Image (cartoon, helix red, strand yellow):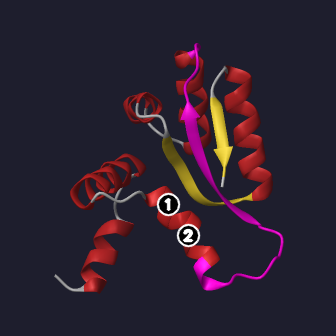
Amino acid sequence: MTQEQIIEAVEKMTVLELNTLVKAIEEKWGVSAAAVAVAGPAAGGAAAEEKTDFTVELTSAGEQKIAVIKVVKEVLNLGLAEAKTMVESAPVVMKTDVKKEDAEAWKKKVEEAGGKVTLK
């Protein structure tokens, strides 16, 4: 399988499928995607400019899991089963490359429902 074929396959995956893939890679090679994401920009010598796109990570469903499922379902336009699986998989990346305003709005909604979100 070529690199291009792999990229095409990943582009077609749902958020839950991507989450499962990342976890499998982390287990297979004993790495952490979070560590790579943190080390990546530092190693590349990124300029100190204001970040405009964020990764939205659901770090905890909290005590009101059903309310959080409803919010995740709404903001990501997911089916109920997908939203439930995602919330139960926390900590999990909800979405990457989210505009600052949207990321902050999603964070506010999830936290009002009782969950916890980290913007990276």
SS class of the residue under badge 2?
Answer: helix
Marks 2/1 in contact by CB < 8 Å: the verdict is yes
Quarter of the image where one finds residue 64: top right
SS class of the residue under badge 1?
Answer: helix
Left or right of residue 2: residue 103 = right
Q: Position of residue 13 (x, y in %)?
A: 34, 59
Between 32 and 109, the residue placed more toward the observer is 32
Above/below status of 35 relative to 44: above
- Residue type for callout 1: Ala
Quarter of the image where one finds residue 116: top right
State yes or no: residue 18 in magenta: no
> Could you tell me which residue is drawn at 81 percent across and 77 percent down?
48
Q: Which residue is mark 1?
A: 35
- Badge 1 crowding class, 10 Å Cα cut-off, few under 14, some 14 to 19, many 20 or more, is few
- Residue type for callout 2: Ala
Q: Which residues are magenta?
A: 43-64
Q: Position of residue 68 (x, y in %)?
A: 58, 24
